Image (spheres, rainbow, N blue to C red):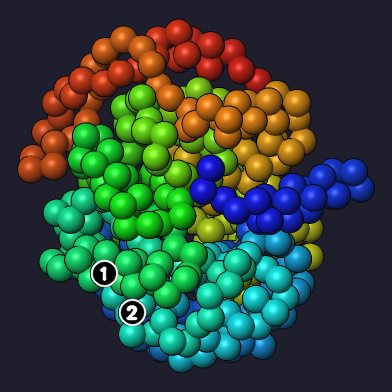
Amino acid sequence: MGVPLSQMWTVASYVLGKKLRGVKRYPVVLMLEPLFRCNLACAGCGKIQYPADILRKNLSPEDCFKAVDECGAPMVSIPGGEPLLHPQIGEIVEGLVARKKYIYLCTNALLLEKHLPKFKPSKYLSFSVHMDGPKEEHDRSVCREGTYDIAARAIAAAVKAGFRVTTNTTLFNTSEPAELRRFFDDMMDLGVEGMMLSPGYSYEKAPDQEHFLPRAQTESLFRRLLHNASKRWKFNQSPLFLMFLQGKWNLDCTPWGNPTYNIFGWQKPCYLLQEGYVSSFKELLETTEWERYGRQSGNVKCKDCMVHCGYEPTAVSQTFGSLAGLWQTAKSVLLGPPKSKGEMVEAPLVRRDEPHQLYALQSFAPKSNQASNTELPILTK
Ligand code: SF4
Ligand code: SF4
């Protein structure tokens, strides 16, 4: 696993404490969006489509600290926009480190090398670098040539300077497993601590609506990606979530697990959907109609969603809150990343050079696992 022991211990004791006190809904990671502007315009991004006056706004460090204190989650993810464009990002990170929060500062890394002197290496701070696959795939995904090379150089520089560095990779129906597997090796060679994978969410506002993955294709893709996974690969996410992505473990969404705070306030109900804002975390918990969201709700917006911000908190909760979850996680930690085994079956994907034409790619889908997966109980909290 790519998560340091001190962080695992902090999260485990936090979750167990909540469970022992009978708290039904609690946050695990605060998604703190200090701004929406970015120096890229990725085709699959649903975060940057705002008028200029909104894009110019920043959360102040005090706004950020208030939200972090109010929420109480042990981990804080700082996405955006591009957080390194925030003029006080150094001060925000320093304040969160002082609060002993484990921070994932998400960045496309175009400015990372330049801004490294603003930060001090700490076990609480990890740069989570947006890398959507090998060079050609990444540059196409972020719609600008040369970005992979800049990000790879920045990763190497940050690792050399003693920072924790992870990657986050969003997968679409153009992702090619063989190339991604080589990309995992490249990231390990660069010295990243762990990699985070997630299918993209079909944001209504994203310019490119062609390449989001429906659930069955996501599972097929992840089974091929993690088939005979190399022991070198380290993932910065829970083994249960990786199994879920392969269709081997049932989870439902915990939308309150990764609550989102940005310039509009606390976002209902999750990081991906914008169905209203409230002014306090308490109000978010108490006034959101949570039963309207998640896989079992029948909500069409949740039907194909398998994104980490909804399902990783459920996986974490099960890891530390159920014997089956703990046992499966322990096995994965001891024996390496969950593997996919099985017979070759056909899975339809969209070919990257012909995005509208369906064709069949071979995959290693585990028939026996697929069958048993449908019988697994869905455990959410
Ligand atoms: S780098 Fe991130 S925030 Fe910026 S456009 Fe791309 S996906 Fe959106
Ligand atoms: S399933 Fe996805 S879109 Fe629906 S509430 Fe959960 S995270 Fe949000």
Number of disc labels? 2
Q: Pick whichever of labels 2 and 1 is earlier in the sequence.
A: 2
Give how far apart the Cα atoms at labels 2 and 1 are: 8 Å
Residue kind at label 1, given as amino acid type? Arg
Residue at the far right in the pictured view: 21
Q: Which residue is drawn at 68% across and 36% down?
A: 319
**Quarter of the image containing the C terminus?**
top right
Q: Residue at x 41, y 82 (%)?
A: 116
> Does the residue tagged 2 have its C-beta within 8 Å of any atom of ligand 1?
no
In front: 35, or 51? 35
Residue 81 vertical position relative to residue 56 in the rendered view, above or below: above
Q: Are marks 2 and 1 in contact (CB under 8 Å)?
A: yes
Quarter assignment of residue 238: top right
| Local secondary structure at mark 1 | helix
Q: Can residue 320 be seen in this view?
A: yes
Residue kind at label 2, given as amino acid type? Glu
The label on residue 134 is none
Q: Residue at x 65, y 76 (%)?
A: 97
What residue is disc 2 on? Answer: 113
| Local secondary structure at mark 2 | helix
Question: Where residue 352 sits in the image (x, y, percent)?
Answer: 13, 42
Q: Say left or right for 323 vs 140.
A: right
Quarter assignment of residue 46: bottom left
Say few, some or many: other residues with alpha carbon within 10 Å of mark 2 (under 14 / 14 to 19 / 20 or more): some
What residue is disc 1 on? Answer: 153
Question: Where residue 70 sits in the image (x, y, percent)?
Answer: 76, 72
Quarter assignment of residue 320: top right
In front: 161, or 274? 161
In front: 175, or 205? 175
Question: Where residue 255 sits in the image (x, y, percent)?
Answer: 62, 49
Q: Which residue is drawn at 18% across and 60% down?
A: 139
In front: 227, or 140? 227
